[in-house]
Image: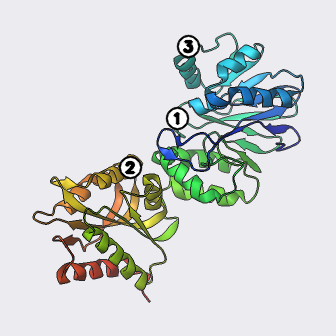
Amino acid sequence: MKITNDIRYIGVNDHAIDLFEGQYEVPNGMAYNSYVILDEQVAVFDTVDANFGEEWMEKLAAVLEGRTPDYLIVQHMEPDHSSNITRFAQVYPGAKIVASAKAFTMMKQFFGEDYPDRRMVVGEGDTLSLGRHELVFVTAPMVHWPEVIVTYDRTDKVLFSADAFGKFGALDVEEDWACEARRYYVGIVGKYGAPVQTLLKKAAGLDIQTICPLHGPVLTEDLGYYLGLYNTWSSYGVETEGVVIAYTSVYGNTKQAALQLAALLEARGCPKVAVNDLARCDMAEAVEDAFRYGKLVLATTTYNGGIFPFMQTFIDHLTEHSFQNRTVGLIENGSWAPTAAKVMAKKLEGCKNLTFAENVVSIRSALNADSTAKLEALADELCREWQK
């Protein structure tokens, strides 16, 4: 694929994968992106997953048309991007390896080799001229590994963005960008909002016309849209007004309360209500919803003196990914000693800027007049700004 007159795409599509990073469902596969700049000197950007080494090398050779690459620029050392460094280095012994100091340390760890005789260590603001193209290296530590660099091509105004602006899904499948990019961001990068904000500030000083990520499509139009979403996500802002209800239920009574609350919210003008049964939904989708919307209701049974396991896992995902800046409502159920609300609140103590709803709904086995009235009060509280 031709990106500009001198830049080519040589990535691959993976439709054999079932779980990305061993946990994220990717029904539409995954793309591992790699790029080449053909100038007086030739630079290759990153490699691909180990399972696609032969295909990638064939694509690289086809683009080179007999030329020899001068540089392999390694922006990120996760194996889905770095696994073919050794293969590349053997086939092209004259090429220099360009990466951050931390990346070379990781190469030694992964491959037992850090290329002392052919390595070029780069850091913030370093440049590399390929002839017509001048590359500027920008450090991006913890977006989302510590060794990451991104690269700006001043000539064609292209940002090679490593894992930033990536998404789930192979490139030969048509799908909405935001949905799978959001799930990708929250799951893969979401904990590191502050480093992403730092990178966005650096990017704001560049004239960017094209973004070339290591996953997902090359972005060429309406870049403000993508940059705006990344700013919202990395600042833990509210992308969509609405309420997420995440529940677990053993015999259906807590589910009934969750669905009844959803109906009450909609009747009061809530712009969007998303309901997730944590035992059955894609957990990553539920976590994505919690970061997308401004308000979250957690509803679960008291279980072994604590909370139901799927709810425990869900809250662990929230805290692990730096959940913050949200309103949280609590619904608990218990036949003899309901304590789930207290346990959930305790587990969220480390999260920043959470506002807990005053109305906590406590159900004794099944909804009755008192707990239904509490549901009504919780719905009123959550919908105050939307009620006409």
| Extreme residue in the bottom direction | 388
Is residue 194 something that shows in the picture?
no
Q: Is residue 62 visible?
A: yes
Distance from the alpha carbon under mark 1 to that under mark 3 = 20 Å
48 with respect to 156 (left or right): left
Residue 120 relative to residue 296: left or right = right
Horizontal and vertical percent for residue 60? 79, 29
Looking at the picture, how far across and down is residue 149, in whole percent? 62, 34
- Circle 2 crowding by C-alpha within 10 Å: few under 14, some 14–19, many from 20: some
Crowd tier of the residue under label 3, counting other residues whose Cα lies within 10 Å: few below 14, some 14–19, many 20 or above: few
Count of numbered circles on the image: 3
Most distant residue in the top direction: 117
- Amino acid type, label 1: Trp
Query: Disc 2 marks which amino acid?
Result: His
In the rendering, which numbered label is found on residue 145?
1
Picture disc at residue 345 = none
Dot placed on the residue nearer the N-terminal end, 3 or 2 = 3
Amino acid type shown at disc 3: Gly
Residue 66, image quadrant? top right
Q: Helix or strand or loop: what does disc 2 sit on? A: helix
Q: Nearer the viewer, residue 278 or 350?
A: 278
Where residue 270 appears, as percent x and y from the top left, is 44, 79
Vertical placement of 353 versus 8: above or below? below
Which tag, 2 or 1, sits closer to the chain's start?
1
Question: Which circle marks residue 317 in the picture?
Answer: 2
Q: Which residue is mark 3?
A: 112
